[in-house]
Image (spheres, rainbow, N blue to C red):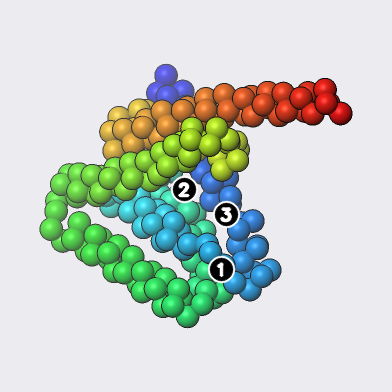
Amino acid sequence: MSSVYSVCCDAAGIAGNLSAFVLFVSPIPTFRRIIRNGSTEQFSGLPYIYALLNCLICLWYGMPLVSPGIILVATVNSVGAIFQLIYIGIFITFAEKAKKMKMSGLLTAIFGIYAIIVFASMKLFDPHARQLFVGYLSVASLISMFASPLFIINLVIRTRSVEYMPFYLSLSTFLMSLSFFTYGMFKHDPFIYVPNGIGTILGVVQLVLYAYYSRTSTEDLGLRESFIESYA
């Protein structure tokens, strides 16, 4: 029975890793454009800076020194951190001087914050308190990250269009959140299942909105075509 439980737990964590990988590679078309044009244009590098900080905090939470037994949290966030560093490196390379200086300063600040978190958690807390300290930081970071789609949800409702909410990105977010929610439940770790439970709910909302407004857009297009044909 325990082996089945362990297999199901690992399966949920691996599924979360695979779904997260889709999210990590989703900005590649943007950076292909940046490299092709030799400019960052109007793109902002801040989302990648914030994503890097989130990955680093969650990576530290998943390390055995902080939380033994949840190494799949560390693996997914280590891969995420590498992707964000690559994106930030490309952004800095092709950004104009002002953006380049700003991004370089923010990147330095991120590593400084991460070093302070690691140092403080190791020197100031015993193992149990360390897990709580880093756990609360990771929850705050994850909830902030999962709250960001609220802007897109609001945009979809206002414009009645799913143009700015790609289906596969929303689906990957939902699957990743659901997988890690399940993984957190198996591990009895509220620092994993609470934020990912919120992410799962927001993912469901995005998918429902996509289904509704994509159908509405198709019906509106059909009505416009019928109207044009009737007067042709």
Residue 14: image x %, image y %?
51, 38
Residue appearing at x 57%, y 54% in the figure: 27
Closer to the eye: label 3 or 1: 1
Bin the neighbour count of mark 1 within 10 Å (Cα to Cα): few under 14, some 14-19, many 20 and up: many
| Left or right: 139 as drawn, with respect to 26 | left
Residue of label 3: 27
Q: Which mark is residue 40?
A: 1
Earlier sequence position, callout 3 versus callout 1: 3
Earlier sequence position, callout 3 versus callout 2: 3
Residue of label 2: 76
| Left or right: 221 as drawn, with respect to 55 | right
Residue contact between numbered discs 1 and 2, judged by CB atoms under 8 Å: no
Residue appearing at x 23%, y 44% in the figure: 136
Q: CA distance from mark 3 to mark 2?
A: 17 Å
| Left or right: 103 as drawn, with respect to 217 | left
Q: Secondary structure at mark 1?
A: loop
Quadrant assignment for the C terminus:
top right
